[in-house]
Structure formats: structure tokens, C-alpha cells
Image (cartoon, rainbow, N blue to C red):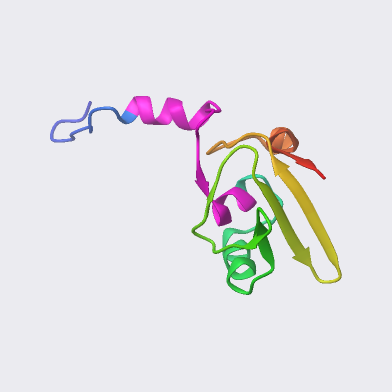
Amino acid sequence: MFPGKRVRPGRAAGILAAVSPRKGAVMRLDKYLKVSRIIKRRTVANEACDSGRVMLNDKVARASAEVKVGDVIEVAFGTKAVKVRVTSVQETIRKEDTKEMFEYI
């Protein structure tokens, strides 16, 4: 380590937990939409939530709503709506593996 640099205890454990899928994991709705690539950018996801175009379990959801496995998300894109069920919640994931985070309904 570098002299004078302090590392917070438990930091490495937090990184490992963020990479592996967890059963009881929760995540903000706007971040989940971005990580799962349902919406490309988090700011766009945030704006969609604020304008009422995103529903979580049949209720209009705010960007700060918590998403967990089993939740149903519906996003209105103009005249078309996309409805998905959350199958996993992960902080980071490869682009090719994002389809495993949700299933279309």
C-alpha cells in the first residue's frame, strides 16, 4: 500500500458482494434500468421515472424506488410499452449477460 493511504475495512468484501448476484439484493429503479440496459442512460431512466412512464408492480414509481427479484417493471416508450420481470439484481454485469437480469412478459 501507499504510505499515508488508509483503506476502509470491509471494502474488498463489498466489491465481491457487488459482483455476485444476491438473493435479497435491492437496487434503485433508475440504476437497475441502466445496468440491465432497458434504458441506456441513468439520467434518461431518471427522467422517465419522474414523468410517470415507469411502473413498478402496477404503481407509478419514482427513480428512488427499490427493485428486487420478482418485481414487475413496465416502461412506456412512446406508443409501445415494455413489461419485464426482474430475475436478478447485480451492480455490474457484462453487456452480453444483461438478458439474464430480466425476462419479458
Q: Which residues are magenta?
A: 12-34
**Residue positioned 65% across, 38% down in the render:** 70
Horizontal side of 71 relative to 78 (left or right) equals left
Picture residue at 51% right of the left edge, 45% below the top? 27
- Kindly give the residue lying farthest to the front in the view shown: 58
Looking at the image, which residue sits at the far right?
Answer: 79
Q: Residue furthest bottom?
A: 51
Residue 9: name its quadrant: top left
User: In the image, what residue occupies the spot 64% across and 44% down?
Assistant: 71
Q: Position of residue 98 (x, y in %)?
A: 70, 38
| Image quarter (top left, top right, bottom left or bottom right) of the C terminus | top right
86 within the magenta span: no
In which quadrant is the N terminus drawn?
A: top left
For this view, does 61 lie left or right of residue 25? Answer: right
Q: Is residue 65 above or below residue 97?
A: below
Does 23 sit left or right of 56 as displayed?
left
Predominant SS of the magenta segment: helix
- Residue 11 lies left or right of residue 83; in this view the side is left
Taking the view exactly as shown, the residue that stands out farthest to the left is: 4
Number of marks in the rendered image: 0
